[in-house]
Amino acid sequence: MGVWRGTSSLILASQSSARKMLLANAGLEFETVTADIDERGIQAASKLSNPREIGLLLAREKAKIVSAARPGSYVIGADQTLALGDRLFNKPAGRAQALSQLRDLAGHSHELNSAVAVAHDGKIVFEDISVARMTMRQMSEAELSAYLDAAGDAVTTSVGAYQLEGLGIHLFERIEGDHFTILGLPLLPLLAFLRRVRLVAV
């Protein structure tokens, strides 16, 4: 039996398999709706450069656009940014860009910033951002190529060209941060909010 107690649907404005898994494992019944926004256009128009602020902005926009079409529902928007120092990374367009990103990340520590926002009737009622620090091991060209061969097209679906819940775990020597943040959803703060507004039973 699920734990959702809202009188209308809970909606995840994302098709991320990791985020869907996290919500389902937490016993939440929800729908998924794609948030059709121009992420890079919104980012450019905002003139923001701080990766955490950008993540929160995009999470808000995803939640709001779906919420506007689904009055009464609670809509979860989420976004994840990756920063190596001042440099912001996006999902690689293909293998060549994935290889270039991995070359730059190898041997260094970077930050994953995972943002979540909840909208209700078009207004943001909750937001949070969590940070994980990831240290990638130094790798040779042969090791990087072997990883890309094994991971295949999946490298283009995640910022940084890796999925930690899969083969991407082989790239790292140290990780500081909780599992949910790394997978792209600050789950504990989200669940605390849902309990506070009496939308979950536990």
Image (spheres, helix red, strand yellow):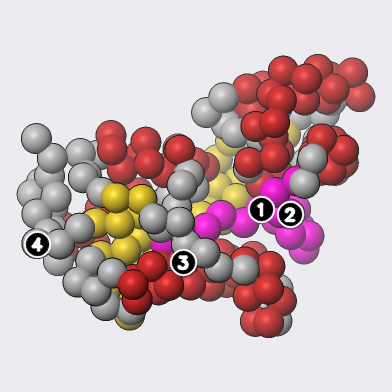
Vertical arrangement, residue 138 with respect to residue 31, above or below: above
Q: Which residue shows up at 35% across the image and 60% down it? A: 76
> Looking at the rendering, which quadrant does residue 53 occupy?
bottom right
Label 4: state its secondary structure: loop
Label 2: state its secondary structure: strand
Point out residue 161 in the picture as x, y percentages from the top left corner: 71, 38
Point out residue 155 in the picture as x, y percentages from the top left corner: 69, 34
Disc 3 crowd rating (10 Å Cα; few below 14, some 14-19, many 20+) is many
Read off the residue under disc 2.
Answer: 89
Between disc 4 and disc 3, whose residue precedes?
4
Point out residue 46 in the picture as x, y percentages from the top left corner: 65, 81
Q: Which mark is residue 82?
A: 1
Disc 2 crowd rating (10 Å Cα; few below 14, some 14-19, many 20+) is some
Answer with left or right where residue 115 lies relative to residue 162.
left
Point out residue 103 in the picture as x, y percentages from the top left corner: 86, 37
Which range is magenta?
A: 77-92
Label 3: state its secondary structure: helix
Read off the residue under disc 4.
Answer: 7
